[in-house]
Amino acid sequence: MNKVKNEHYQKLEGILKEKNLGEISNFEFKYQGFHNYTYIATINNIDYQVRISKSDVFKDKKNEFKYYEDHKDTLFINEEILVRKWFKGTTLDQVKLTEEIQLAVLSKLKNFSSIKLQVQEFNWFEDKINDDKYKNIIKKFLKQPTVLQHGDLVLKNILINDHNEIEFIDLEWIRTNFNGFDAISLYKQGFDKKLLMQYLNVKKSEFDDLLYICKIFDFYIYEQNYLEKLYSSMTPENLLPSFSKSSYKVTDKVIQRKSQQFYFSSIGEFDLFPSIYYENEKIVLRQWVNARSFNWCKGNIRRVASRIKQMHKVKSDLKYDFDIKIKNLYQKYSNNQVFKQIDDQIINKIFNHLSNPRDLVFSHNDLHQNNVLISLNDGKVKFIDLVDAGLNSKYYDLAYLSSNLNLNEDRENHLLKCYDQNIDKKEFYKYKCIVNFCGLLWSLSLEDSSQEKENINNILKYSSYL
């Protein structure tokens, strides 16, 4: 990175000298995206955003050029470099999205949308996307007046200062379009649906139509233009720490390898999970969730239990095959010495129960504490890493989380009571035996023996409930 930074410093320094625009006293790297590197440079004692395009990316920036070329805060702009006054604020991904802040952003968006600028019209590619519903919705909305659209209004492209003043940055995708695209982007980032519907002055059915076409459009864009970049971004330096070693952070998104053919987008839009931008049979591209730290006090246990209950109500056409997955895993490791500590009769009973489950619901199936987050932005509990999601007993997620947290009896009872007043404790304890058996198998597959002793103890402790 230092080599790239030095090259960019020299490039900027050369332009400033050539144009007699000043001298650099500080040059700080901020972040990089798919298309650009962004720095903060102090020039003549004033902080500027310096955005430099990546050499392997060709992108027509004439629309953005029209916006910035006569702007009072622009020091220099060409096809490769933008230098403009830095707005001293925080990107919105670092703050809680209170109603006051959301309204401030929507007020800014209203003013931005009304700017009259001769820029290119947004291309929905309806001639290239084979989806009749998509085409019909677009035809309906094309009858509406056009506005100026940001086109990439994600939280990292919105700045806010201490006075709740808002600034939009990175306007490479500005186009004219019917109103709605930017609002849907905000919805995916955690903005309140009712506030957005009021801003757009649309009914729920119209909002859902906008959500549908934006979802289809995102899929097409990533499939056609970014798929190779997504795969090439799955590098060791982008790997997120986790047991599965399957997730990679790239800018404000996460690329995750899939372990099954299940399509996450098939279950619909829920604020229980991060927004999905793209997926195929190998990977899923989802929103990165900025999480705040929290402890497992009774209040937070209640919040999590309520969200688990909501997740378990998600409708799904999936078939139950969890027993087959565990059997296959056991066959692979059945000769391991660790299983000599568990009576064959216990193992047989575990598989008998797995083959005859009850209370089937849509389950996370890997609900350890690191997969439960409280979003910094909207304050909601969210579940991540659903690569093992599928049908399972409602007791599986509850038993898994309780075992992973090693909850004492009081807090475990609180978890169950907040989930359902009429919980079957015997069935729950049965699944505490089962989840520890599954956990033991996964530990073997990941070559991680840190929980082995605890798994064995819990299997034996709760085996009488089988």
Image (tube, grey):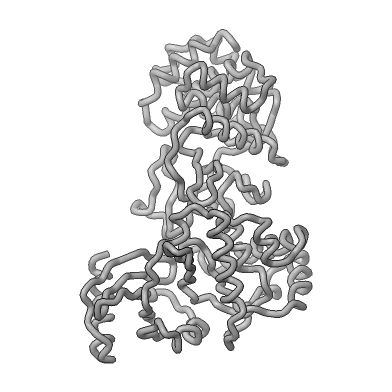
What is the x, y in percent for residue 80? 38, 81
Residue 214's place in the image compared with 347, above or below, is below
Quadrant holding the C terminus: top right
Query: Seen in the image, is 323 located left or right of residue 85?
Result: right
Query: Seen in the image, is 214 located left or right of residue 93?
Result: right
Q: Which residue is located at x 36 percent, y 70 percent?
A: 37
Q: Which residue is located at x 40 percent, y 22 percent?
A: 452
On the question of residue 252 being in view, the answer is yes
On the question of residue 255 being in view, the answer is no
| Picture mark count | 0
What is the x, y in percent for residue 316? 71, 41
What is the x, y in percent for residue 78? 39, 86
What is the x, y in percent for residue 43? 26, 79
Q: Which residue is located at x 69 percent, y 20 percent?
A: 422
Q: Which residue is located at x 49 percent, y 71 percent?
A: 168
Query: Seen in the image, is 178 located left or right of residue 140?
Result: left
Residue 49's place in the image compared with 317, above or below, is below
Quadrant in which residue 425 is drawn: top right
Quadrant holding the N terminus: bottom left
Query: Seen in the image, is 22 located left or right of residue 103?
Result: left
**Residue lying furthest front in this view?**
163
Residue 343's place in the image compared with 352, above or below, is above
